[in-house]
Amino acid sequence: MRKMLAIARKEARQTLRDVRTLLMALFVPLFLLWLYGYALNFDIRHVRLAVQDRDHSAESRELIAAFVNSTYFDIVATPTSERDIETLIDEGRARAVLVIPENTGRTLQAGRDAAVQVIIDGDNANTATTVLAYVMETVRGVSAQLRAERLGMAQEPAVTVEPRVWFNPQLNSTIFLVPGLIAFIAMITAVVLTALSIVREKERGTMEQVRMAPVSTLAYVVGKTVPYFVLAFISAMGVLLAGMAVFDVPMRGSWPVLLLATSLFLLAGLGQGLLISTIAESQQMAFQLALLSSFLPTVVLSGFIFPIASMPRAVQVITHIVPARYYLVALRGIMLKGNGLALILPQLGALALFIVVVTALAALRLSRQKG
């Protein structure tokens, strides 16, 4: 224990003298949270809509007003020909075009159903799907209103739906994305911090002194990890509190459970960084490996943005070795649902297993290098 603490004190002094490391650990994560927190948003507003009204009736004006009042659409053009519509779509000046045919109002006044056309730019499938849902909902509302006016009374459907959305009633995508950002930023910070530590010893030539010192490999690994754990923990707490304050992410669960889950996740990232540092021979190579092994898996394979259940079976198997997969389930469960320790024990167990495996591999490689 005394030797381990000596290693930890030495590493802490070196870290406190390294201004770049402190900036990267404490201020860069907050900047990334601010940047990505505002940039990543699945809520679509201000869809550029062009309207070609060939009818110019009271009913067509009512339909157009419904699109404007929905707050989802901004009318940007009123094309008069098919060529104008093609130009608007091709140049990206309109995301959707509403075409109201002639005699639409007369058809509705005669008691018959009328059809309108909506042309949607499908270059982005996700955006197009959302815009289509907005269009259908707006047209459905106007249609129900016109039917009620035509019949003199509202026509109630035989089956109605009363939706109740738990944990995120407004379906605000920020509340879903910010916990993922917290995991993403914490993982990169933890991996990069320790990935550079042992490589720095190699480049400075002090690694040979460490190999000759009467310090066990386990004491050396733990001693190297302790200062960076404290630094990464302070950084993670700063990002967590900033996410709650700036983006109104709720905290419905227990703080001790959240701190336990965060500690295990940071230890997993630190262990992964230590393993990388035993492989890389330069800080540049260690930094690249750290980003490659933490950035892409955390974004793509953790469920941060893309649901794991929708991935091919082979890719789903790979996600089991991504620590952020387990931390995200625990973090969202604690913060958004108020889950207790019993509900996230499988995720904490998986993180603990990952810590043991990567730390053992790092210690094994270091012991071979010392030998």
Image: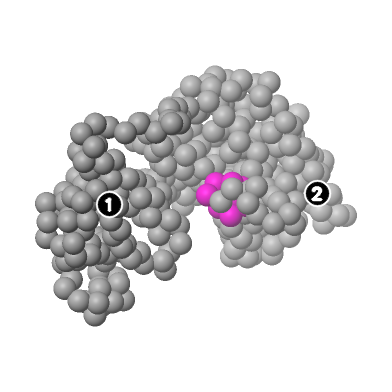
138 in magenta: no
Q: Quadrant of the N terminus?
A: top right
Asked whether 281 or 159 is in front, the reply is 159
Residue at 20% across, 76% down: 81
| Sequence-first tag of 1 and 2 | 1
Residue for badge 2: 361
Q: Is disc 2 placed on a helix, strand or loop?
A: helix
Q: Is residue 179 above or below residue 111?
A: above
User: Can see residue 156?
Assistant: yes
- Please give the residue where the numbered disc 1 appears in the rendered image: 112
Position of residue 101 in the picture relative to residue 29 (left or right)? left
Residue at the image point whose x is 28% and y is 60% from the top: 116
Q: Amino acid at mark 1?
A: Arg
**Residue 321 x %, y %:** 72, 48
- Span highlighted in magenta in the image: 298-305
Q: Residue at x 24, y 48 (%)?
A: 111
- Vertical order, 55 against 325 (above or below): below
For the C terminus, the image quarter is bottom right
